[in-house]
Image (cartoon, grey):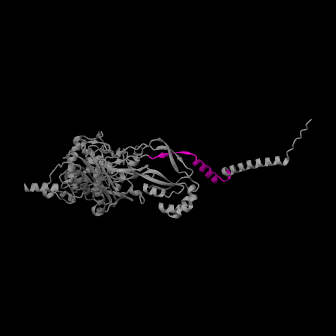
Amino acid sequence: MIKVTRQVVPAWRFSLVVVMLVTLLSLLIWQLLVLQVFDTERGHDFLQDQGDARTVRTEPIPAYRGVISDRNGEPLAVSTPVASIWINPRHLSKEQDRWGELADVIGMSHADLSAKIIKNSHRGFVYLRRHLSPRQADEILALEIKGVNAQREYKRYYPAGEVAAHLVGFTNIDDKGQEGMELAFNEWLRGVPGSKRVLKDRNGNVFRDIDQQTIARSGKDLVLSIDMRLQHLAYRELKGAMRRVGAKSGSVVMLDSATGEVLAMVNQPSFNPNNRRALKPNTMRNRAMTDVFEPGSTVKPLTVVAALETGRYRPSTIIDTSPGYIRVGKKTLPDPINYGAIDVTKILTKSSQVGISKLALDLDEQSVWEVFSRFGLGISSGSGFPGESAGMLPGRPNWRLIERVNFAFGYGLAVTPLQLAQAYSVFASDGVLRPATLVRQVEAVDGQQVIDPVIADQLLTMLKTVTEDGGTATRAQVVAYSVAGKTGTVHKAGVGGYADDRYMAVFAGVAPASNPRIVTVVMIDEPNLDKYHGGEAAAPVFARVVTDALRILNVAPDKMLPANNLVKSGNRQSLKSKKSQSLVEGRESA
């Protein structure tokens, strides 16, 4: 019989194995605690780095923003490809010996770059420079510094610069519309970004595209109604006028009388949308659409419309303005001289306060208010421009006599230059009011008949006398073209009432008067006191702009002036154009 001997394992060996297993488990638990609890920053970095080295990422493909152009196809806003440099500070912090090299190439001080990296050392993505040219980006990437990457983007560029800045607007650094038509049509212009899957290395650098999931869709193009030839012209003349009369600000608006399209809209002061480093908020306003003012005498023709509509007045109806002033309540309203007995037409020719006051006192105040409302005052023009003002057209059940009179000659209400131009377009389009539009129209927009075509024609004939000899706006005359319009010289409100030394000079006109093509409004804010009247500060700008605009638009002349009247005070030297001079010489030789 064989005897089996059992070998006894020493207790210390068993204890050793248990201690080793417990130690390993403890170390594992401790490492997890360190990464997840005690040292979350290092733990996050570790896990993030490991994830970066093993993750397939989806990256956006930027979409091309639509082009904005004028009615003739001239580009006003285009997008150009650029590159933005971004860094992974966690990776770049390990390349401290190359920070100086990177700072020199990218154009930063060593201290600024170091501070940026250290401040964001816990992050994995930080922009270093936005919107660099592809060549600049290639120079930076050529350094092959770990943690430095490039991202493809688009940058908006505005070829017209400050000339069309208020109308076109601009985008921010992320290509989103911020002002003007860029903002109003942002959804139309912006496009839809695409996406692609990429494989990154452990440093976060893309080393291979896997596939393209969605294709980027470019934004739609936008064609504005403005004609850049007229826009440049209006901007040049307004800027020159600002220097000549020392004004605070100004606006010019030009409409197509048949369609309601805005052919030109400029303001001063302006700004350069391509360089906004020193941008001032007050220069960004499209004053022609956002700023309101009391229109003064420019709305006297609307009061005359209310009078003609009663049937009790005609353009030839005589009104006695003697003795040259009228008392309304406690206020005396004078004319420059005693015009005596004059007809309704001459009330507009001379801009008689007494004559308009007598008409206003004889009319029902609600009927005058209703005419103003029909002409679009106090109502948005319908352009859809961001921040556009609707003006102010106050209404009340009971009017004091002085309120009725002030309202009739343009005080106590507020309009924008665009609203005033839209109102005058009614005279130019046989009594039809059309919404103003900043987008080119293939066909004329249907309008609303707001006054009888006969009355509209009568007003044009009456307003022609304002620009003829004896009128208040002879400086608005245009060679070979008839002009119908009205001046306005408005006291600005100050502390305690209207100021005696601050004015707004306005002129609103239609040309040619016999067959209207354009409606133009000029507003000059606070010109020098030696040239503050509408006929002195605003009318000459109208003449300069309209003279060249009608030539550019190939509008046929509708009148011939005598040779000795071709050059008049306030008109440009361009009135002596070769074409006009040849006509004069031909007539003289005949």
Q: Nearer the viewer, residue 345 or 126?
A: 126
Give residue 279's quadrant in the image: bottom left
Q: Position of residue 445 (x, y in %)?
A: 30, 40
Q: What is the residue that sits farthest to the right in this orientation?
A: 1
Q: Nearer the viewer, residue 75 or 366?
A: 75
Quadrant the C terminus occupies: bottom left
Can residue 21 be seen by looking at this rendering? yes
- The answer to if 205 sits in the magenta stretch is no
The magenta region covers: 37-62
Q: Position of residue 167 (x, y in %)?
A: 35, 51
Q: What is the residue that sits farthest to the top in this orientation?
A: 1
The residue that appears at 24% across and 40% down in the rendered structure is 452
How many numbered markers are drawn?
0
Q: Taking 583 as reference, is 209 above or below it? A: above
- The answer to if 56 sits in the magenta stretch is yes
Q: Position of residue 555 (x, y in %)?
A: 21, 48
Q: Position of residue 269 (x, y in %)?
A: 35, 58
Q: Nearer the viewer, residue 194 or 566?
A: 194
Can residue 344 be seen by looking at this rendering? no
